[in-house]
Image: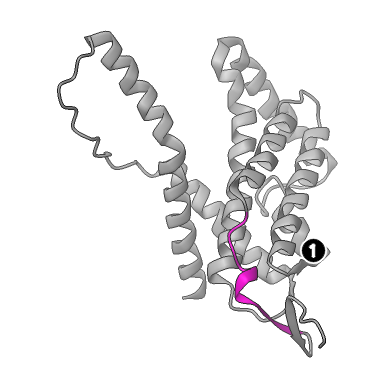
Amino acid sequence: MAQRTPLQRDGGASTAVAGLRSPADRGRVGVYAALGASVGALPLPWIPDSLARRVRGALVHDVAVRHGLSLTNEARAVLADPWKSDAPRGVMAQAVRFVGVRLVARTLTRFGPLGALWPARNALLTFALGHLFDRYLATARTERAVRIDLDEARRVRAAIDAAVLRALSVPTPAVDEPTIIDDQRDATTALVDGLLGVIAGVPGRLLARLEEGFDEALAQAHG
């Protein structure tokens, strides 16, 4: 009996089997995010952008093939670009952007913990790209083509950018914390515990906001 392939092709169109459309391993996406953070820490012009593009390109390729899909070179370029698709391009534009942003970043690093903001930004954007691209392929993609083309990539990239902007700019609603019964802590311990608990809850809340914003942006694009 002939073996069945993961994709049943018919004249350039395809239907993925149900088992193929499972969420990508978040730990795997997290590794790419860590690589993005390390790239963002390099104090050199042009090189960070180039390496970030390599990391992000490998990430979207990894996610796509795990759904039995491929990317055109143009689609990969749009998704992998570390800056928005309407950002200035070219060597001179990159140099100007580097000088302005890096001078500000270098000044901020003198104030201790603020020096981690640049790598953290790259980590967040890389994770958002991998997680939301995987979410799109697993739950929202309606195209039957095996290959993701430029127009589709632009729609997805625009939705990802909108979701990140919304998650970071819209005020977060208050979170209902569990009621503590018979609290034996002193005031200082309770304060420190509370601050650490808020920090620990940031990734979960941010992830939920990213997904909500992404779903809304996709719905508006299709509407």
* Left or right of residue 211: residue 183: left
* Percent position of residue 220, x then y: 46, 69
- Position of residue 4 relative to residue 125, above or below, is below
Which residue is the site of mark 1? 74
Instruction: Using the image as rendered, state which of residue 56 and residue 163 is in the foreground.
Output: 56
- Position of residue 141 relative to residue 193, above or below, is below
* Percent position of residue 14, x then y: 71, 82
Residue located at (68% from left, 54% from top): 85
Instruction: Using the image as rendered, state which of residue 216 and residue 36 is in the foreground.
Output: 36
- Position of residue 50 relative to residue 136, above or below, is above
Q: Residues within 10 Å of mark 1 (few under 14, many from 20)?
A: some
Specify the amino acid type for callout 1.
Glu
Residue 118, image quadrant: top right
Residue 121, image quadrant: top right
> Tag 1, which secondary structure?
helix
| Residue 18 highlighted magenta (yes or no) | yes
Residue located at (61% from left, 10% from top): 110
Residue 77, image quadrant: bottom right
Q: Which quadrant is home to the N terminus?
A: bottom right
Q: Residue furthest front?
A: 1
| Residue 217 highlighted magenta (yes or no) | no
The colour scheme of the drawn protein is one colour
Q: Which residues are magenta?
A: 13-24
* Percent position of residue 27, x then y: 62, 43
* Left or right of residue 27: residue 212: left
Residue located at (62% from left, 58% from top): 157
* Percent position of residue 184, x then y: 20, 14
